[in-house]
Image (spheres, grey):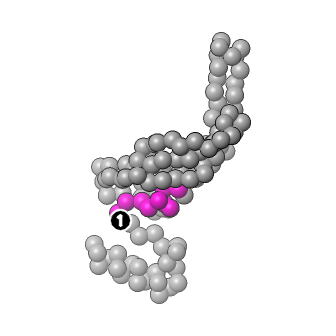
């Protein structure tokens, strides 16, 4: 396995594609987590964001808001069943305008998958 990783890295370096090469193995970095979480949040925001239906308590008001990710701090990761699945504990710094304009830290547990297109959040 190590030989394949070294050979793949060497091939990518020779071709000048090191930033574009995705070499499997190991847990996601903080950068991988931020990129995957940001893509997942943008997907949710693109689908209409989060909707809070207040029902009788708010005269049946539906509040729509989106999530803005400001920072991701990786606390730990552990394998989750296979070498391509990882369960990570992270702290997200987020705002949810117009509901909340001040960034707050939220501890979150996320499952990540190391797929052919890079790291993805598994829901």
Secondary structure of the residue carrying tag 1 is: loop
Q: Which of 46/55 is in front?
A: 55
Q: Which residues are magenta?
A: 25-34
Count neighbours of disc 1 (C-alpha within 10 A) and say few if under 14, some if 14 to 19, many if 20 or more.
Answer: few
The percent position of residue 100, horizontal first and vertical second, equals 66, 36
Which residue is identified by label 1?
25
Kindly identify the residue that appears in the image at 32 percent across and 76 percent down.
Answer: 4
Query: In which quarter of the view is residue 54 placed?
Result: top right
Above or below for 97 versus 119: above
Query: In which quarter of the view is residue 55 placed?
Result: top right
The percent position of residue 30, horizontal first and vertical second, equals 47, 59
Q: Which of 59/90 is in front?
A: 90
The percent position of residue 3, horizontal first and vertical second, equals 29, 79
Q: Does the segment drawn in magenta span residue 26?
A: yes
Kindly identify the residue that appears in the image at 65 percent across and 14 percent down.
Answer: 57
Left or right: 64 as drawn, with respect to 6: right
The percent position of residue 14, horizontal first and vertical second, equals 47, 87
- Quadrant housing the N terminus: bottom left
Kindly identify the residue that appears in the image at 69 percent across and 16 percent down.
Answer: 58
Left or right: 39 as drawn, with respect to 78: right
Do we see residue 41 in this rendering? no
Q: Residue furthest top?
A: 56
Above or below for 104 versus 35: above
Q: Which of 34/1 is in front?
A: 34
Kindly identify the residue that appears in the image at 68 percent across and 40 percent down.
Answer: 101
Do we see residue 16 in this rendering? yes
Left or right: 45 as drawn, with respect to 22: right
Q: Does the segment drawn in magenta span residue 53?
A: no
């Amino acid at each position: 396995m190590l030989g394949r990783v070294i050979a793949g890295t060497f091939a990518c370096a020779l071709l000048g594609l090191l930033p574009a090469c995705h070499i499997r193995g190991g847990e996601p970095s903080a950068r991988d987590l931020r990129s995957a979480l940001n893509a997942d949040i943008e997907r949710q925001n693109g689908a209409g964001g989060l909707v809070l239906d207040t029902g009788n308590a708010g005269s049946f008001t539906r509040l729509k808001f989106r999530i803005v990710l400001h920072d991701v701090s990786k606390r730990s990761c552990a394998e989750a069943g296979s070498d391509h699945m990882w369960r990570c504990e992270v702290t997200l710094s987020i705002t949810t305008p117009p509901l909340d304009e001040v960034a707050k830290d939220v501890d979150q547990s996320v499952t990540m998958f190391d797929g052919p297109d890079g790291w993805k959040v598994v829901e």
